[in-house]
Image (cartoon, rainbow, N blue to C red):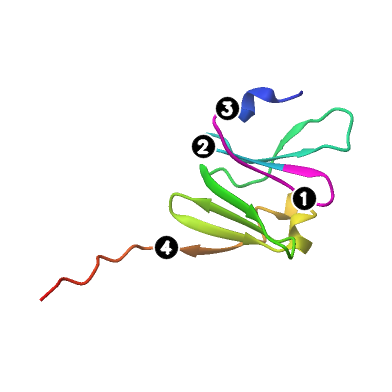
Amino acid sequence: MHGQASLDRISSLALDPEGKLWVGTLTAGLRVIRTKEKALAVRPTGLAAGIRAMHLDYHGDLWIGTDRQVFWVSAANRRTVRELGRCPLDWHYRGRAAPADH
């Protein structure tokens, strides 16, 4: 497989209906492999943060969790890899301390 070195420390995988394998890594961010192509090249997506979790929901939307953000990528945007870094909506999670017991 071309680019195999970029698949170090895989944290999550998701296979979409179009045959793209989304690979979340802790060190190289989000990668994609088009499984219907002979070369099986590993391609970057523009999301370089370490991926902690990933989920492809029943609508075909891809949810990606990093240490500090959750990215939502609609099925329409997911189909075009070059759009991925530009189109996801991100929400910043800022943890709050639990209320003190009185």
The answer to which of marks 4 and 2 sits earlier in the sequence is 2
Residue indicated by mark 3: 8
> In which quadrant will I find the N terminus?
top right
> What is the C-alpha distance between the residues marked 1 and 3?
21 Å
Amino acid type at mark 2: Leu
The answer to which of marks 4 and 1 sits earlier in the sequence is 1
Q: At which x and y percent is residue 66?
A: 49, 50
**Is residue 44 rendered magenta in the image?**
no
Q: In the picture, residue 93 is in which quadrant?
A: bottom left
In the rendered view, would you say 69 is above or below 29? Answer: below
Is label 2 in a helix, a strand or a loop?
loop
Is label 1 in a helix, a strand or a loop?
loop
Residue indicated by mark 1: 16
> What is the C-alpha distance between the residues marked 3 and 4?
26 Å
Name the side, left or right, on which 23 lies relative to 101.
right
**Which numbered mark, 1 or 2, is in the foreground of this view?**
1
3 and 4 marks in contact (CB < 8 Å): no
The answer to which of marks 1 and 3 sits earlier in the sequence is 3
> What is the C-alpha distance between the residues marked 3 and 2?
8 Å
> In which quadrant will I find the C terminus?
bottom left
Q: At which x and y percent is residue 57?
A: 68, 60
Is label 4 in a helix, a strand or a loop?
loop
Residue at 89% over, 29% down: 38
Residue indicated by mark 4: 93
Name the side, left or right, on which 18 lies relative to 64.
right
